[in-house]
């Protein structure tokens, strides 16, 4: 019997999930965050439906603080592949000048969590694919692949729908929705190995390169444009850094690395001494902060 | 190529389950350093001793950490150079049976943890039973806390024998390993403490075990997930091959219709290929254009069953109880159909395995049921193939996944024996209408307000979503009973027929309202006996004076003038009911107020 390798099994599972949603859900969308997990999801979506294009649009929740290279990459990909790309920003938050320097945790709530909920409501999507993986964090480890959300986008971890075999229950009432995680069972190493195997295009920020940065709270923060505020005593220096996750540049920690090829990144990931979420500043705030955010509707 | 093993761990907090997995991750140096740091930190809060509490690695949800138990499935990932592993860590308590079933449905192998000082307990039997039900064929018994018994070989062998006896049916492999989760014996490396044990340590065992189903056990089979139509000329059937393999040119059969065609082209995720096999996601185009849609099943040689009834063993997972006769949606493979639970054959005592009679099921209970579908569906016995034998039931109102189950065998409606077993009962019809059938038998003088009240009441009931029928003198006398006059024998027959009709309609699940004078006690008694417990007598006790004053149809005047002999209340008696459940005098209330009072009383009977 020719047994499939583990990447083939993960790939087949993800494609099955993508097709189930396309067949059963009324108005699906794929959340596109431009990161490596999103790039893998996009690649899987292209594969799952060929010779058709993915039968749903792609939604990016922008904050205006994403790395410039991410936005360039996003627009190039959408054009190359002929995708229907939607971009949503919390205009109210923009008008009020909400920014990552002055507003801390509120910034993430308003510009990301709230914007995501408002964006989904605005377009009336009933199901949204997300690139979340169960190996990322403890509360995520317990989330179903098809994760039911109330009309206020809340997740109830104590009362999740049982998920048996591949028999996903996609039924919802008006106003309710599903978050669907096709990469639930992938690990960070799986994602990188798959990117290498499939030669998937990713944002160059993942590769080590000399970049202008400041050292803050144990991370290198990239000075991506002149909106970056320096604290007293901080100075911009040029360091060879790379990023393990991508988000808003003032909140994304890079670190010094020589890994400028996929092989080097994979070697670094397999031997990693810290899990990838440490590079997202929000997680350090409180114990179990991710579970709280997820209950409120964060991806 | 490196494979993937999905496994579930079963056991309770006291057995040291989370500690075992935590230890496996920790010792295999698979922990990321910052998670380790967090663990040490949490340990200081979590344990009095100050040592590392490995279980904190696994119990993720805040509620669980507060209660110190595992309430939902947590998935853990790790890889060695030989294999990638996904561990579904599941709760052991009986009230979380459904969560364990979620984990078991996902896994190919179960690690059953038993505390050697306790031996095989009721919960061990329950865990094995749930895992077997959900289709697990490979078991590992990890006999934990061996250190507490001084690594006693005799005790180990005793429990091993007991466990093997427990898992004889339909099991492909069983491994029994003596371990200590806290000390680390036989988890990563063979322990010097158990020289008498000649098997592999747990991790090595899991790296080597072959869980592939036996070759050639089922031919090519693929449920259609969706039809891809990028343009007029291409029509591709998309799905995942669930068994066997397929090549361009092969003849296939489309079920349930049994149409045949040949494979024209085969796309493996966009790439044209000559063959594809089990587990792969493909797009198939056929030479002949057939009417194929989502839910159809493509096969070659092996033919699954096509029928509209089956017997399944189901695990109830909903907070609201399951009763016979209720409607659900059933999902098998990629097909969803309305279905009805016809009959609970028996309930399975999850601890002892005994069959117990039942007509309802509570959360976490398992039962064998006959299920009827709204139309024919392609399925198979779960034992023959998981992908066509597993099912879920979805509540049509709440959308909850109410149950999961496995199909045991098909039922044929055409055979009488089976049909008798699964007769539709009055209760099923009533439950389908979400109501209790009643006959509201209004009795009272002419002009007392029976018809008016019955009419108003029916409107209210219908507005509440009830299914009703109103029988009154005029519509019955003009149709069913038009051959009857007003002689005594005819009046008796009139009431008898009405009672029989009311009973039939109650059988159909309806709420019947009748408005007839029905003046004689023995006629009403007859009706009560025919209709049975659904009979509710409502005496409209408006006085003769009031009725005569109203005289809507001018009948009292005619009766007083002698034009109508034997008119009830004038030339013929009205026997006042002695057993009426409800009495109301319309002389004292407006129609609305009287209807309000009546409805309130009737709701008691509808509960």
Image (cartoon, coloured by chain):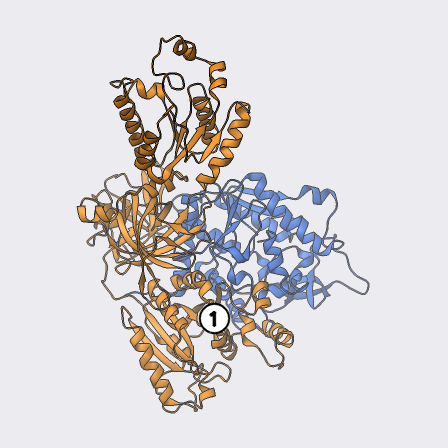
Chain colours: A blue, B orange
> Which is nearer the eye, A83 or B535?
B535
Q: In the drawing, does residue B566 fall left or right of residue B254?
A: right
- The residue at 42%/68% (across/down) is B8
Is residue B559 among what the camera can see? Answer: yes
The image quadrant of residue B142 is bottom left
Chain ID, mark 1 = B
Residue B515 drawn above or below residue B182 = above
> Which is nearer the eye, B405 or B241?
B405
Residue A244 drawn above or below residue A108 = below
- The residue at 47%/35% (across/down) is B602
> Which is nearer the eye, B142 or A243?
B142
Is residue B135 among what the camera can see? Answer: no
> Which is nearer the eye, B585 or B278?
B585
Label count reads: 1
Residue B411 drawn above or below residue A290 = above
* Image location (x, y in percent) of residue A122: 59, 39
Regarding mark 1 in the picture, which secondary structure is present there? strand
If the image is split into quadrants, where does the N terminus of chain A sit? Answer: bottom left
- The residue at 30%/65% (across/down) is A2
* Image location (x, y in percent) of residue A7: 41, 63
* Image location (x, y in percent) of residue B560: 41, 10
Q: Which residue is mark 1?
A: B78
* Image location (x, y in percent) of residue B604: 47, 40
The image quadrant of residue B339 is top left
- The residue at 63%/50% (across/down) is A113
Number of other residues with Cα within 10 Å of mark 1, as a class: few under 14, some 14 to 19, many 20 or more:
some
Q: In the drawing, does residue A184 fall left or right of residue B68?
A: left
């Amino acid at each position: 019997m020719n047994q499939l390798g583990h990447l083939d099994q993960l790939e087949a599972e993800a494609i099955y999930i993508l097709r189930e949603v396309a067949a059963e859900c009324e108005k699906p969308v794929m959340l596109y965050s431009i990161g490596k997990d999103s790039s893998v999801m996009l690649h899987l979506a292209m594969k799952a439906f060929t010779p058709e294009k993915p039968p749903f649009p792609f939604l990016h929740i922008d904050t205006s603080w994403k790395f410039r290279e991410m936005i360039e990459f996003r627009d190039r990909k959408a054009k190359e592949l002929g995708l229907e790309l939607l971009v949503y920003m919390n205009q109210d938050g923009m008008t009020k000048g909400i920014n990552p320097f002055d507003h801390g945790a509120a910034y993430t709530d308003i510009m990301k969590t709230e914007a995501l909920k408002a964006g989904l409501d605005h377009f009336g999507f009933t199901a949204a694919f997300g690139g979340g993986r169960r190996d990322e964090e403890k509360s995520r480890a317990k989330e179903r692949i098809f994760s039911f959300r109330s009309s206020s986008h809340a997740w109830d971890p104590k009362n999740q729908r049982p998920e048996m075999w591949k028999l996903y229950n996609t039924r919802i009432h008006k106003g309710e929705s599903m978050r669907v995680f096709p990469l639930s069972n992938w690990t960070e190493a799986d994602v990188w190995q798959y990117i290498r195997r499939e030669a998937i295009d990713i944002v160059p920020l993942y590769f080590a390169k000399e970049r202008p940065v400041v050292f803050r709270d144990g991370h290198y923060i990239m000075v991506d444009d002149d909106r970056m505020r320096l604290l007293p005593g901080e100075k911009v220096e040029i360091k060879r850094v790379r990023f393990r996750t991508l988000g808003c540049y003032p909140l994304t920690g890079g670190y010094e690395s020589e890994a400028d090829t996929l092989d080097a990144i994979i070697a670094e990931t397999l031997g990693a001494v810290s899990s990838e979420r440490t590079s997202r500043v929000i997680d350090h705030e409180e114990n179990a902060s991710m579970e709280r955010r997820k209950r409120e509707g964060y991806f | 190529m490196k494979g993937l093993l999905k496994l579930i761990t079963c056991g309770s907090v006291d057995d040291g389950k989370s500690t075992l997995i935590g230890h496996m991750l920790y010792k295999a140096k698979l922990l990321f350093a910052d998670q380790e740091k967090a663990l040490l930190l949490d340990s200081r809060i979590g344990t009095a001793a100050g040592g590392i509490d490995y279980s904190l690695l696994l119990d993720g949800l805040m509620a669980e950490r507060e209660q110190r138990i595992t309430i939902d499935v947590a998935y853990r990932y790790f890889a060695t150079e030989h294999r990638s592993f996904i561990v579904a860590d599941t709760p052991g308590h009986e009230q979380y049976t459904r969560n364990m079933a979620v984990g078991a449905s996902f896994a190919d192998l179960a690690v059953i943890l038993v505390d050697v000082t306790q031996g095989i307990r009721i919960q061990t039997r329950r865990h094995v039973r749930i895992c077997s039900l959900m289709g697990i064929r490979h078991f590992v018994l990890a006999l934990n806390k061996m250190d507490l018994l001084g690594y006693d070989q005799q005790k180990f062998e005793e429990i091993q024998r007991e466990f093997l006896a427990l898992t004889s049916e339909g099991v492909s492999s069983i491994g029994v390993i003596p371990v200590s989760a806290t000390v680390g014996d036989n988890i990563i490396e063979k322990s010097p403490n158990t020289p008498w044990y000649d098997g592999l340590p747990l991790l090595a065992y899991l790296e080597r075990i072959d869980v592939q189903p036996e070759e050639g056990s089922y031919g090519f089979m693929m449920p259609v997930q969706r039809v891809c139509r990028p343009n007029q000329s291409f029509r591709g059937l998309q799905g995942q091959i669930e068994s066997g393999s397929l090549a361009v040119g092969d003849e296939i059969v489309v079920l349930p219709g049994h149409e045949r065609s040949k494979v024209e082209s085969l796309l493996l995720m966009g790439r044209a290929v000559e063959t594809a096999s089990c587990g792969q996601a493909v797009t198939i185009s056929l030479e002949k254009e057939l009417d194929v849609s989502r839910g159809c099943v493509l096969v070659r040689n092996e033919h699954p069953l096509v029928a509209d009834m089956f017997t399944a063993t189901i695990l109830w997972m909903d907070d609201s109880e399951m009763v016979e006769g209720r409607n659900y949606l059933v999902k098998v493979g990629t097909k969803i159909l309305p279905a009805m639970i016809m009959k609970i054959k028996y309930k399975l005592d999850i601890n002892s395995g005994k069959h117990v009679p039942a007509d309802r099921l509570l959360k976490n209970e398992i039962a064998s049921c006959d299920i009827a579908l709204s139309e024919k569906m392609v399925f198979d016995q779960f034992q023959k193939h998981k992908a066509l034998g597993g099912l879920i039931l979805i509540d049509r109102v709440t959308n909850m996944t109410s149950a999961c189950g496995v199909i045991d065998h098909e039922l044929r409606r055409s055979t009488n024996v089976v049909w008798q077993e699964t007769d539709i009962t009055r209760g099923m019809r009533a439950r389908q209408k979400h109501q209790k059938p009643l006959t509201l038998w209004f009795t009272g003088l002419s002009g007392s307000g029976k018809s008016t009240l019955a009419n108003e009441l029916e409107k209210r009931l219908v507005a509440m979503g009830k299914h009703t029928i109103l029988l009154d003198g005029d519509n019955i006398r003009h149709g069913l009973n038009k051959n009857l006059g007003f002689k005594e024998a005819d009046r008796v027959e009139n009431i008898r027929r009405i009672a029989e009709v009311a009973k039939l309609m109650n059988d159909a699940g309806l709420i019947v309202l009748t408005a007839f004078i029905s003046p004689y006690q023995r006629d009403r008694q007859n009706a009560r006996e025919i209709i049975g417990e659904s009979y509710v007598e409502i005496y409209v006790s408006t006085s003769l004076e009031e009725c005569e004053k109203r005289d809507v149809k001018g009948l009292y005047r005619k009766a007083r003038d002698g034009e109508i002999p034997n008119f009830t209340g004038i030339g013929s008696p009205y026997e006042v009911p002695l057993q009426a459940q409800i009495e109301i005098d319309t002389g004292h209330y407006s129609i609305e107020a009287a209807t309000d009072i009546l409805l309130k009383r009737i709701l008691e009977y509808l509960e």
